[in-house]
Image (cartoon, rainbow, N blue to C red):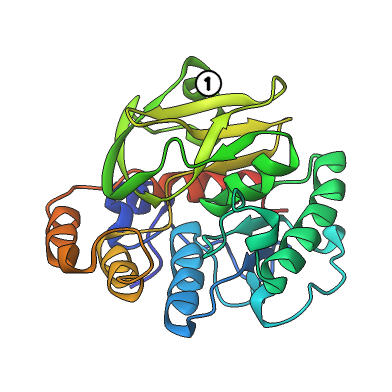
Amino acid sequence: MGAPSVVMALMLGTATGAAPIPSGTVKPFLLLATRADDDVADQEYESFARFGGLEPGQLRRIRLEAGPMPAIDLDGYSGIVVGGSPFNASDPAHQKPALQRRVEREMHELLDDVVARDFPFFGACYGVGTLGAHQGAVIDRTYGEPVGPVPISLTEAGRADPLLEGLPDVFDAFVGHKEACRTLPAHATLLASSPLCPVQLFRIRSNLYATQFHPELDEAATVRRIETYRHAGYFAPEEMDEVIERVRAASVTEPPRILQNFVRRYAR
């Protein structure tokens, strides 16, 4: 059986991922990762590739926690993706370990070039702590959300944005974060919100996006994250089974479309 059509892939959502981009026709995308746990890091890579419709070789990965960021030639890529992270941008500088300070410095320097060129960028969760902080957003713990599904509501600008084409005005997504964007800079465009977190998705210039929710997570991946980070302070360890039940009872199917749209829009 051949690869599913784009329409069928969108209909099936998280069941199959996106229809694949034909091999050898585009420059690869680049995933910048910071997770030290190999199992979760590999699952994150697989999820971004699957839901973006990217085959092996079309999504390259640099694990920043493993070593310094190498020189990145943006002309060699279609776009940049940033996954989640154990780092909190809002932590006081003196409390941040050397590894976090190095990653933040390297990300900031890369974003100088990315923003200046309006180069396609998509950051999930840690995208808020990287792109948001770089652009002058206020990142703190005012609007943290517990692990689980939340309703995401598109703004008027969100309904008109090509990255959100095909999504309903309100859809569920998985979250779980200690910090969030409290105030966006004036030049940012708010695209989506949730009841407990006013900034769930925003855009800088025309091609740079950051979400607080996780469009790369389905039920199985979310449960794996919960089990891995049981003692990381996102919930009381003894509440893990309850958190997993809440996730398994949810119907989260729409967010992967955002990754599909990002890849389809910027593949070159």
Would you call the spot at circle 1 few (<14 residues within 10 Å), some (14-19), or many (20 or more)? few
**Quadrant holding the N terminus:** bottom left
Image side of residue 19 versus residue 59, left or right: left
Task: Classify 209 as above or below 9.
Answer: above
Residue at image position (48%, 81%) is 37
Pick out the residue farthest to the front: 94
Pick out the residue farthest to the top: 156
- Asked if residue 63 can be seen in this view, the reply is no
Residue at image position (38%, 33%) is 167
The total of numbered circles placed on residues is 1
Q: Residue 31 in the image: state x and y as whole percent.
A: 63, 65
The residue singled out by tag 1 in the image is 160
Image side of residue 17 versus residue 235, left or right: right
Between 30 and 188, the residue placed more toward the observer is 188
- Asked if residue 144 can be seen in this view, the reply is yes
Q: Quadrant of residue 168?
A: top left
Q: Residue 3 in the image: state x and y as whole percent.
A: 41, 66
Between 179 and 184, the residue placed more toward the observer is 179
Q: Residue 42 in the image: state x and y as whole percent.
A: 48, 79
The secondary element bearing badge 1 is classed as: helix
Q: Quadrant of residue 157?
A: top right
Residue at image position (86%, 58%) is 75
Task: Classify 121 as above or below 158.
Answer: below
The amino acid on which the numbered mark 1 sits, given as a three-letter code, is Ala
Task: Classify 120 as above or below 237.
Answer: above
Residue at image position (78%, 45%) is 119
